Amino acid sequence: MTAKRILLIGTYDTKDPEMRFIEQAVREQGAVVLTMDVSVLGDPQTPTDISKHDVAAAGGMTIDEVIAQGDENKAFRVMSAGAAKVVAQTFAEGRLDGMLATGGTMGTDLALDCAQALPMGVPKYIVSTVSFSPLIPPHRLAPDIQMILWAGGLYGMNSICKASLSQAAGAVVGAAKAAGAPDRSKPMIGMTSLGSSCLRYMKTLKPALEERGFEVAVFHSTGMGGMAFEKLAGEGAFACVMDFCMQEFGNMMAGSVVSSGDDRITNAGRAGIPQLVAPGALDLLDFAGWQEIPERYADRPFHEHNRLIKSSVFTGDERRAWMRELAVRLEAATGPVHFFLPVQGIEGWDREGEEAHDPKALADMVDEARKAMRGRVPMTEVNAHINDDAFCDAVLARFDAWVTDGIVKA
């Protein structure tokens, strides 16, 4: 087996002993080490494979120009941009199988950009003094990133921080050895959904699509799942997307922490991937389980799903606004788009007798969809609930037509 190549990223001017310790630990695991210095002011005791001069140049400056800014934050913004470009180029050249970066807040800020520069499936680890911290907003996280707390590692070496660094070295090498290349023998469908108590269409659609020779990946649309979906769509990983859960989109519009970022419902369209879209769960506004429900939502229907997540319900006016923005994003797509409108309901808890039942708000959303999509996005109205068989039948009919027409490559 060819030895795996691990890129180590850190500030070798201040953390040289720690970085050399990781190098040794990685080599002891049988991997090859490639080192990158992202320091600004100082120099490592021995040269690295990729110097701070290389990183600064990739960021558009010389290291002297970076220093001349006289501001640590500005300097590291340049180094972050340069480091991310170097990481992407190094991977494109086939020179790395995994990434391991270290840092406090500055180094972590840079490392997050480097992780975002790598495709899904490439092991990416960060040993950070702020791992899992609320300082790190969800949109900065690569969907498959791994973080390990750099316990006791703020200044100098000790047995506690050595344990963290050793664990990280073993983790990234082990992940690089175990990671398999995606199987591209079958075209893949990317689908968004929630648990089957809320949305059930994947139970029908997944086996039906597999019978047609496609692989199906269903993404849990609670923030990180949507990030992974959007990342892979942007990389062109899908033959078609069935984006039927809009919960993250509504959350993003309302400013919820349960969001997958501002680029939701843009990457498949930008990549020209055929899109089948529906407004599943666009009525739900999510809160983290630890949050207090703001007073302005106190008189709305409420569903506490578990200790991690709970939901309130959007008004008709809010749903109208979300639908208008959804139409704008779909219209901007460079590939085929078809929108399905299930007029009898959009998730399991909006049926009569359930907590989120609000027929007036649903009617407002349906009315706005008819107005917003008309003449802009092809639309099929389905006189059924999104969890009914009729919805899946309509989706499969359109999908099969696209396969027949060569829009979706079988």
Image (spheres, grey):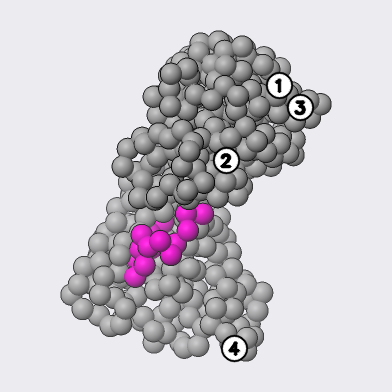
Choose mark 4 or mark 3, whichever is in front. 3
Q: Which residue is mark 4?
A: 70
Question: Where residue 386 sits: x, y (%)?
Answer: 53, 19
Question: Where residue 218 sits: x, y (%)?
Answer: 46, 31
Name the residue: 34% across, 43% down: 308
SS type, badge 2: helix
Question: Where residue 18 sits: x, y (%)?
Answer: 31, 77
Q: Are marks 2 and 1 in contact (CB under 8 Å)?
A: no
Q: Which residues are magenta?
A: 124-139
Q: CA distance from mark 4 to mark 2?
A: 40 Å
Q: CA distance from mark 1 to mark 4?
A: 55 Å
User: Which one is earlier in the sequence, the residue at label 3 or at label 2?
Assistant: 2
Name the residue: 62% across, 89% down: 68
Residue 72, placed above or below residue 392: below
Q: Nearer the viewer, residue 132 or 5?
A: 132
Residue 379's label in the rendered image is 1
Choose mark 3 or mark 1, whichever is in front. 3
Q: Which residue is mark 3?
A: 371
User: Which one is earlier in the sequence, the residue at label 3 or at label 1?
Assistant: 3
Q: Sort mark 3 into few (<14), some (14-19) or many (20+) by Cα contacts within 10 Å.
A: some
Residue 101, placed above or below residue 341: below
Amino acid tagged 4: Gly
Name the residue: 61% across, 11% down: 383
User: Which one is earlier in the sequence, the residue at label 4 or at label 3?
Assistant: 4
Amino acid tagged 2: Phe
Question: Where residue 259 sits: x, y (%)?
Answer: 51, 46
Residue 249's label in the rendered image is 2
